């Protein structure tokens, strides 16, 4: 009996030490890497590189950013998930990953990844056209794309720039007339429109802004149910003024950018990283980045709130693509259900 009691007490001690270790404040040892699935120069690249110095300052370590473009960030996601879940490898990501369950770019989804912070909840994604087309209004755009073959740039199948464009084409009944051309970053997606490599895209003012200033392309509306006030380009009307059938989707498919880790990462590490990103996002440098890109500071989400957006947009976007025939795998096969199936 004494021997059994001693074994039980020893087990309780080990359990207590394990819990105590889990509750300890985490301090990284070595260099943290932020891995992103797009090439340098795009909006997500700028977000990560702006965050890195302040993140390192707060955590007391070096932080570097590495680009691993390909498969609409699927390659980067798989890489991060293959690393130890110790907080030392962070995924700089976007709503492109919301379609993985149907595009098969990766097998990972919100079911395996936890969002730490989501500073860029994009509300200024819009229809952007090459200026040489001579299209100045959405009415003219709709007439043009429904009667002519067109090309549209994306950052890959399922990317945050593909989903709204594909849904718009499907709603207008002209999917068979649109050829989607993939690029490996948001910046290159916008540049393709500006240079006339493609006719149009669904992209945000973060990436298209410089080319809009140069008069190479123009934004006709935003994917929203409400108008958007851009401090530089004026009022952008909502797409629902022209395509009311998109009312249920317009506020969902605009896209987001954030930072995530494997959900196997210990809670104390996730808590410390979330705390660190809150510090980062409240620095003057990051606030300036948000302001320069017309991102509302009030829209920044952390932890469970960010995860909720991740889950919702994943469940909506994956089925949008699957129903349109742009997805090869039924999301249900990997446990991702339609959003209305609560």
Image (cartoon, rainbow, N blue to C red):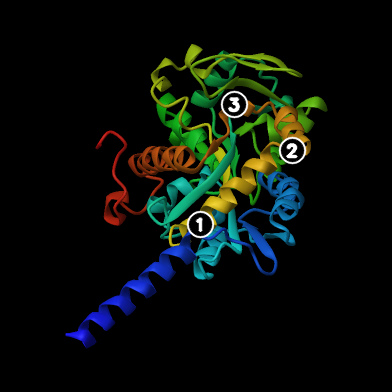
Label 2 belongs to which residue? Answer: 283
Q: Residue furthest right?
A: 214
Mark closer to the chain start, 3 or 2: 2
Which is more N-terminal, label 1 or label 3? 1
User: Residue lying furthest bottom in this view?
Assistant: 3
The picture places residue 184, in percent across and down from the top left corner, at 64, 52
Position of residue 60 measured from the top left corner of the image (x, y, whole percent): 73, 58
**Residue ID for mark 1:** 268
Which residue is at the front of the view, 102 or 29? 29
Q: Residues within 10 Å of mark 1 (few under 14, many from 20)?
A: some
- The quarter of the picture where residue 264 lies is bottom left
Q: Nearer the viewer, residue 191 or 256?
A: 256
Q: Nearer the viewer, residue 146 or 169?
A: 169
Mark drawn on residue 162:
none
Foreground mark, 2 or 1, reads 1
Quadrant for the C terminus in the image: top left
């Amino acid at each position: 009996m004494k021997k059994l009691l001693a074994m039980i007490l020893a087990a309780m001690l080990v359990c207590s030490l394990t819990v105590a270790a889990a509750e300890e404040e985490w301090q990284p040892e070595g260099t943290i890497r932020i891995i992103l699935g797009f090439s340098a120069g795009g909006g997500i690249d700028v977000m990560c590189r702006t965050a890195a110095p302040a993140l390192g300052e707060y955590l007391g370590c070096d932080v570097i950013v590495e680009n691993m473009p390909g498969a609409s960030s699927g390659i980067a996601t798989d890489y991060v998930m293959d690393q130890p879940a110790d907080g030392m490898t962070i995924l700089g990501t976007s709503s492109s990953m919301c379609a993985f369950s149907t595009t098969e770019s990766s097998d990972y989804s919100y079911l395996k990844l936890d969002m730490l912070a989501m500073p860029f909840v994009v509300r200024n994604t819009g229809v952007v056209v090459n200026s040489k087309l001579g299209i100045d209004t959405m009415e003219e755009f709709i007439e043009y794309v429904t009667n002519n073959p067109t090309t549209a740039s994306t950052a890959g199948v399922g990317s945050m720039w593909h989903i709204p464009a594909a849904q718009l084409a499907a709603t207008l009944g002209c999917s068979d007339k649109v050829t989607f051309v993939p690029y490996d970053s948001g910046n290159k997606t916008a540049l393709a429109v500006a240079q006339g490599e493609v006719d149009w895209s669904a992209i945000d003012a973060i990436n298209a802004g410089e080319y809009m200033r140069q008069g190479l392309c123009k934004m006709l509306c935003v994917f929203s149910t409400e108008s958007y006030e851009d401090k530089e380009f004026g009022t952008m009307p909502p797409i629902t003024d022209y395509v009311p059938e998109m009312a249920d989707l317009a506020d969902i498919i605009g896209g987001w950018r954030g930072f995530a880790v494997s959900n196997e990462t210990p809670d104390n590490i996730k808590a410390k990283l979330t705390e660190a990103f809150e510090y980062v996002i409240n620095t003057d440098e990051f606030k300036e980045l948000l302001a320069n890109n017309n991102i509302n500071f009030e829209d920044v989400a952390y932890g469970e709130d960010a995860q909720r957006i991740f889950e919702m947009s994943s469940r909506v976007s994956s089925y949008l693509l699957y129903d349109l025939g742009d997805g090869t795998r039924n999301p249900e096969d990997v446990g991702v259900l339609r959003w209305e199936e609560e």
